Image (tube, helix red, strand yellow):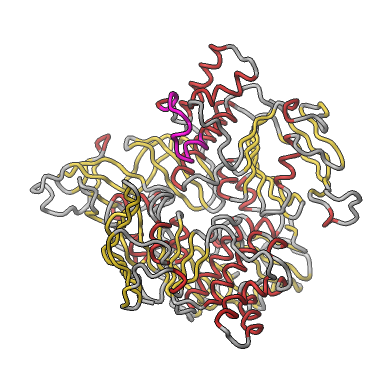
Amino acid sequence: MARIELDLAHSYKPNPQQDSDYALLPLSMVFEDGGAYALLGPSGCGKTTMLNIMSGLLVPSHGKVLFDGRDVTRATPQDRNIAQVFQFPVIYDTMTVAENLAFPLKNRKVPEAQIKQRVGQIAEMLEMSHQLDMRAAGLSADQKQKISLGRGLVRSDVAAVLFDEPLTVIDPHLKWQLRRKLKQIHHELKLTLIYVTHDQVEALTFADKVVVMSRGRVMQLGTPDALFEKPAHTFVGHFIGSPGMNFLPAVVDGATLQVAGQRMALPARSLPEGALQVGVRPEYLALSAPQAAGALQCRVAQVQDIGTYQMLTAQVGDHTIKARVAPEVALPAVGDSIWLQVLGEHTCFYQNEELLA
Amino acid sequence: MELVLERISKRVGGQTWLHPMHLELESGAVTVLLGATQAGKTSLMRIMAGLDVPTEGRVRADGVDVTGMPVRERNVAMVYQQFINYPSLTVADNIASPLKLRGDRDVAQRVRALAERLHIEMFLDRYPAELSGGQQQRVALARALAKGAPLMLLDEPLVNLDYKLREELREELTQLFATGDSTVVYATTEPGEALLLGGYTAVLHEGELLQYGPTAEVFHQPNSLRVARAFSDPPMNLIAASAVEGGLQLPGGARLPVALPADLAASGQLTLTLGLRASALRLQSRPGDLALQGVVELAEISGSDTFVHATTPWGELVAQVTGVHHLDLGSAVTLHLDPAHAYVFGTDGALLLAPARPGGR
């Protein structure tokens, strides 16, 4: 297992001149030994480029990659001792489940007794013990992907296990189980795991730390709750959460704050004069009494029953905001005027898209 | 369009792909086909489109028997998982193709209007290969909408897109469906997507139609254990229980006061299943709650919620609590639940009791 350090940039073009020429903008970051990390972002954000640089499939155009302090920038994936799991099952159909799981160990000439022990352990963790003697060909896509996961996790001596969207082909219910399994396996085996996904739920539930990326830039490296409670950038606020954080334009003018054109008293914290953005998550936007301090008057645009809660969509001037409301709360009708508590302990303030401390 | 599938079934070789089912789609509304892979969603859609003929039964469109009528003679628009466009045509020509085929006038104007609704008006002169996946799927959607077909079939159209993009496009589609008058059928494996789309939902499982009705109603009143399982994310907690005087006897000795039907004992239904949605389990207690002791196995923070997996006398349960909560592995936790939030299923899996819906909706 290894501590992975990146201090690099990558451009697919020979002479990068501007930010948009880079697939990965200059970054410096450390993945601690034994940590569970997720690289999260929309397609084209650079997460797969970063993963490929770590695995050795790609040599960065600038800078270097260190594994436990050793420069491996130009080392092959084999030299780096990396295990990988891909989006689709990569297994041998003609082999049994046990043979598939044993394969990476046999390749490394691990003693037979040790192979048996490790294969048994992994199969048990993935609840595949009863299928060990079955041929992989007869299994469903879900089951095959479980074998792929097992093959990735079977070696105890790897520097890191890299996962590239491993749960894409898995049905929602099995996803629940597998996410949980991965997390438990991480607790037991203490491998360094790096997981690429565009799905925030997968990233946040899997990882201890999440790297949120956009357009080749690392926007924030943080724990799941930091990304939720204190997004460092409006992009992170928008990207994390479903729906994402609400943003409203605001202006600080002396002792008053204007939010979406409505005046209210400044909250008890120092804010710079001028234009700001107020960020508040749908989960923290509550209905309040008319004229309450820190509340905004809005008009109800839509009320949806989303099963476990209700989604309220409201208009404030030209802005749309969303509030997540408990199912038992009686909501006003579309077109009604309501007050929503915008300022509170969970409210964040942004200037030029960056979080104000 | 009024689409009726009359006692249709589909068998291929010796295998049954669709068990006999009768489905009358709500005209002019969205019907979600919800089910895991292999549930029969695509088989059903192919029959609706006219790509396949049912083994038994008839398909009626606006009262006319169209069973066996090929797809090209029907007026159907389809969108698939894969982004399918004409690679040699520009975005504008792709969207225009159904309009030109029909000999419409003011094609350019219509194309622009549709492109604007799907936010791809800046790419009209580009070719599909020059666009991102999300943009390509918007082109396919615009072309399907341009057709203005009375029946629009979408087979997991957002599954290959990024999470956030999916969220955006789903919201736009919901609005487009609401303002149009086409009958829309939308297949998905995700319960959350069905709830966001609203409309009506048909729950499918291994080729069987389990339940059809307004989406929120099917969610809140699943008529069987199988529907409850299929239409919950996280999975509904299911606990073996037995009927006793005044309620349910649960493993570990707890009793849950619920009003069970009076004739249960007479019908020999003693082993029941208690169903609890993950969101019905809370960390804070309220008056009248039942408390359940457990040990935390895992706490997953998903952003807006924390999923607490706990081992309890009732088995392994999942609680979905709003906000960020830090719970250490192996620590003790007390889960609280309001008996009024209990679902109860009979020995045969049929729904016996569902929570009353707030506001009577």
Percent coordinates x, y for residue B308 in the rendering: 46, 42
Is residue B36 among the parts visible in the rendering? yes
Is residue A329 shown above or below A83? Answer: below
Asked if the magenta segment contains residue B135, the reply would be no
B71 sits to left or right of B84: left
Residue B287 in view here? no
Which range of residues does the magenta coloring cover?
A131-146
Q: Position of residue A246 (x, y in %)?
A: 61, 65
Name the foreground residue: B121 vs A197. Answer: B121
Q: Position of residue B299 (x, y in %)?
A: 50, 40
Q: Is residue B217 left or right of residue A203?
A: left
Pick whichever, A222 or B87, lies toward us. B87
> Where's the N terminus of chain B, which quadrant?
bottom left
Quadrant in the picture for residue A270: bottom right
Q: Is residue B339 left or right of residue A9?
A: left
Q: Vertical placement of B354 versus B295: above or below?
A: below
Asked if the magenta segment contains residue A141, the reply would be: yes
- The percent coordinates of residue B83 (x first, y second) are 59, 60
Q: Is residue A188 left or right of residue A236?
A: left
Q: How many marks?
A: 0
Quadrant housing residue A196:
top right
Quadrant where the C terminus of chain B is found in the figure: bottom left
Tell me which secondary structure the magenta stretch mostly adopts: helix
Which of B87 and A106 lies nearest the eye of the viewer? B87
Q: Is residue A209 above or below residue B355?
A: above
Residue extending furthest bottom? B105
For the residue pair B115 and B151, the one nearer the viewer reads as: B151
